[in-house]
Amino acid sequence: MSKEGVTALYGRDTLSELALHLQAVSKTFGGLRAVDGVELAVRPGERRALIGPNGAGKTTLFNLIAGALPASAGRISLFGTDVTGMAQHRRAALGLARTFQITNLFPTLTVLDNVRLAAQARTADRFAMLRPVSGFADLQARAREALAAVGLDDRATSRVRHLSHGEQRQLEIALALAGRPRVLLLDEPTAGLSQAEAGHMTALLRGLDPAITLLIIEHDMDIALEVARHVTVLHYGRVIADGSCDAVRADPTVREIYLGA
Amino acid sequence: MTSRRALLAGLGTALVAGMVAPLLSAYPLTLLTQVAVVAILAMSLDVLLGYTGLPSLGHAAYFGVAAYAVGILATDYKRGFLTCLLAGLLLATLTAALFGLIAIRASGTYFLMITLALGMVVWGLAFRWVSMTKGDNGIAGVPRPELPLPWSLAAPLPFFYLTLAAAVLAWALLGLLVRSPFGLSLMGIRESESRMRALGYNVWLHKYLAFVIAGAFAGFAGVFWAYYNGFVSPVDVQLVTSVETLLMVALGGPGTLAGPALGAAVIVFLKNFVSVYTKRWLLILGAVYIGVILFAPRGVLGAFRRERR
């Protein structure tokens, strides 16, 4: 969508209040333009799905937003703050959390310690050196709360590598939630899950605090549409459609390249 | 639960060592004193290797600079224990703070190589800066410390108790450190740096702090080493010392604190008994290392530590 389009859709005044705003964001790897002039405007509290075929640049776009990769061009802002050149941990401090497509946890630590790490990340307690972790009641409560939110409270003392794949995917979400994020990037939360587990995950995502802004990458269009009302379609690094679910479903280009119909 | 058991086991070991010590003859007591000092060094490296996942091959540098600080101050300047202790700690911490700036940028094998190179720099200084370090001759005649105690620390037994107290103190402080939120963040870095960054941690800063803290504790060991040995030479900062320390950690069980202390005991005793029979001590050491990697990759303590599912 062009800049004028974004302004027309949301109004000029609200532009600075966007939770997430990408302007002409590109990423090139050598000769490959993995992300090509992406424009994206996500309002606070919005649920937005990012769909597209394999290699469309969805995960790369997440890495650019989160700061795991530097953008080659363009501007990224989070609640009106320009974060384009900001280190990853500083973006997280502004309330940006993410999950990973390929499970990325702390495998030899317990489930509770995993979530504790997330809970303390944005507090000054992370530098506390002379008191045992168990003595920090508020961190403990937040960690327990995040575990309860994803239904893992009974696995708190298990080592993460002994969890099933489905439980590890749930823990991914718990880690992101424990930091009390304002914007949450979910990279294929249902990857590798059985149909039943995926249904469980979708219910969990639908039940999240409505104040949290969600940007969710999903391969399965049905699941994406269950969580989000607004869909952005990425193809070869470009935004080829952006709008309500029905509009995107009806879009002929999307039907042709994505739905294959 | 497990931390309480660790506490009891550690204090129990220290208590037994303390009770057995008066019954020992001079030579075993000397070795036991050496174990106490070297255990501090091994535990300090464990913070890096076991908890943060940073394999340093230059840990003798911080140990060595502190030993040299004590050696020079106690002989040429006739300074007391407290001055020497503070100077040693300060110099080791500053060296680690400086070297950390260079080393923490790298990870894995590159970190290993850079710490090795930085360790060689300190060794080069010890060897070549003759006016300060007396070069290859070393600094001889470091007197035992004098403290306002009813017992003279020149005697082996009171000095052993001093080093034992130092080891218990280091173990307690490091034990608190690794169980703290900061210690947890180090383990998080060991497991997944990318996840830590995504959670909002400044991974570089946490690694750097761990590096400096480990350096400071290595310095703490170095101070007592100078007093124990009465002699400081380039041998104390050479690569073999760093490698031996790494081996103590790997042998005892990285990430357990008590394990590396146990590893220190095994290596010290092995080294002193085996070297009576053969000069090929390093060959035996290598064989022990291969055995550990093959049969107990998580170290002696790691092998006995069962996990709850």
Image: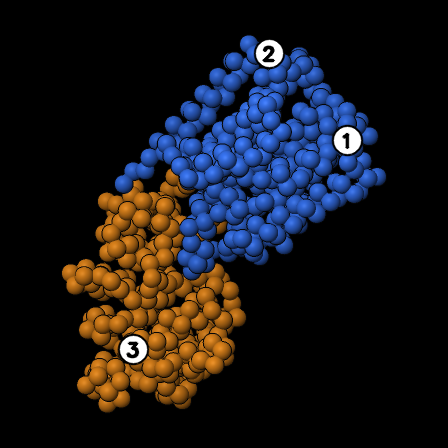
- Quarter holding the C terminus of chain A is bottom left
Residue A163 position (above or below residue A21): above
Q: Name chain B's colour.
A: blue
Q: Name chain A's colour.
A: orange
Between discs 1 and 2, the one toward the N terminus = 2
| CA distance separating discs 2 and 3 | 77 Å
User: Residue B282: percent from the left, percent from the top?
Assistant: 58, 34
Query: The disc labelled 3 sits on which kind of residue?
Result: Pro
User: Residue B306: percent from the left, percent from the top?
Assistant: 33, 35
Residue picked out by circle 3:
A53
| CA distance separating discs 3 and 1 | 70 Å
Query: The disc labelled 2 sits on which kind of residue?
Result: Ser
- Residue B162 circle label: none
Residue drawn at (30%, 71%), measured in percent from left and top? A217
Q: Are marks 2 and 3 on the same chain?
A: no
Q: Nearer the viewer, residue B262 or A74?
A: B262
Residue drawn at (47%, 76%), measured in percent from left and top? A29
Residue picked out by circle 2:
B25
Residue picked out by circle 1:
B139
Determine whether the residue tagged by mark 1 lies in a helix, strand or loop. strand
Residue drawn at (77%, 24%), measured in percent from left and top? B141
Q: For residue A32, what is the image quadrant?
A: bottom left
Q: For residue A44, what is the image quadrant?
A: bottom left
